[in-house]
Amino acid sequence: MNMLVAFISSAIPLGVPLLFGSTGEIVTEKSGHLNLGIPGIMYVGAISGVIGAFLYEMSCGNVKEAMVPALAILIPLLCCILGSVLMGLIYSFLTVTLRANQNVTGLALTTFGIGLGNFFGGSLIKLVDSDMPSIILTATSSYFRTSLPFAGKLGWFGEIFLSHDFLTYAAIIIALVMNYVLNKTRVGLNLRAVGENPATADAAGINVTKYKYFFTCVGSAIAGLGGLQYVMAYANGVWSNNAFGDRGWMAIALVIFALWKPSMAIFGSFLFGALCNANNYIRGLGDATQELFKLLPYIVTLLVLIITSMRKKREHQPPQSLGLSYFREDR
């Protein structure tokens, strides 16, 4: 029982960055844009928050008692959102205004974002003159990792559901809110119309360009929070270049698993987290077999893609104009 509780509680933090990333990508794809730059955006969001936290800790003399808890949280959050939105604006300008190829632009944005993050990360590491190639923001991380004080008194229930950082609950709330917006509001209806057939939406008086720009930036901001959560909560405030792994790509794969539904992404992200964590709880198998277990999220995604393709239900398919640039003159 204790092992099961530990397994579930440790799988949830693994899934939170994926939930942020997949929710952000779903919002972007609903506007008809396939943003393969999500890994780079999450990386930039993470390093932007790290820079903000680093400068604030330095201004306080690296003394936790001199830090204001609200500022220790708000500064990294705002820096993360700002950096992520700027990346979203770059992508929007290239793909909406200049009508560049979305796949190429997204891949270029990922390469650019990772390079940018490594550049600033490496610069900060040189500033602190650390023996280890990393930055440690223990004070800021402690505020991000604060959990409910009564969680430990509720046994397994508290450990599984109430012992996590506030960004974990924020990720779930954001996914539910976006699910409501997409399916129950006029704004969501207009957005889905833009993603399905922008020419028809334009003829109906919907500002296609505004919707594409705005929701691509919103999706980028949400995805960027996943990078910040990984560094501040999961990695305990430790930044190391290229330590983010393939979480951005897993978030994109999760969009297919979730069938472009933010509510389904909640279940899928924690399932992916459990599958990624499974190899840590398997004993008696060789290293090669344990490594194979890391492929489980991708195998599950492929199976879902095959099943949904065979059933051909319209609600399980991506937006019809996904990946296609819109030329108003072609209406």
Image (cartoon, helix red, strand yellow):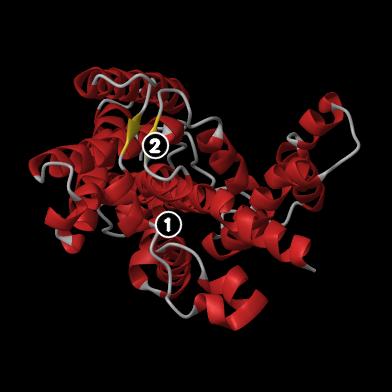
Task: Name the element at disc 1.
Answer: helix
User: Callout 2: 10 Å neighbours few (<14), some, many (20+)?
Assistant: some
Task: Indicate which disc, 1 or 2, sits on the residue closer to the N terminus.
Answer: 1
Q: Quadrant of residue 149?
A: bottom left
* Count of marks placed on residues: 2
Could you say which is closer to the camera, residue 56 or residue 74? 56
**Which residue corresponds to the image point at 69% horizontal and 43% vertical from the top-left?**
276
Asked whether the viewer can see residue 329, the reply is yes
Which x, y percent locates residue 21? 47, 46
Look at the picture and state if 326 lies above or below 138: above
Residue type pointed to by label 1:
Ala
Task: Name the element at disc 2.
Answer: strand
Quadrant location of the C terminus in the rendered image? top left
Which x, y percent locates residue 142? 34, 55
Which x, y percent locates residue 90? 25, 30
Could you say which is closer to the camera, residue 13 or residue 111? 13
**Which residue corresponds to the image point at 81% horizontal and 48% vertical from the top-left?**
307
What residue is shown with label 2? Answer: 238
3D distance between C-alphas at marks 1 and 2: 42 Å
What residue is shown with label 1? Answer: 193
Residue 19: assigned label:
none
Q: Is residue 319 left or right of residue 84?
A: right
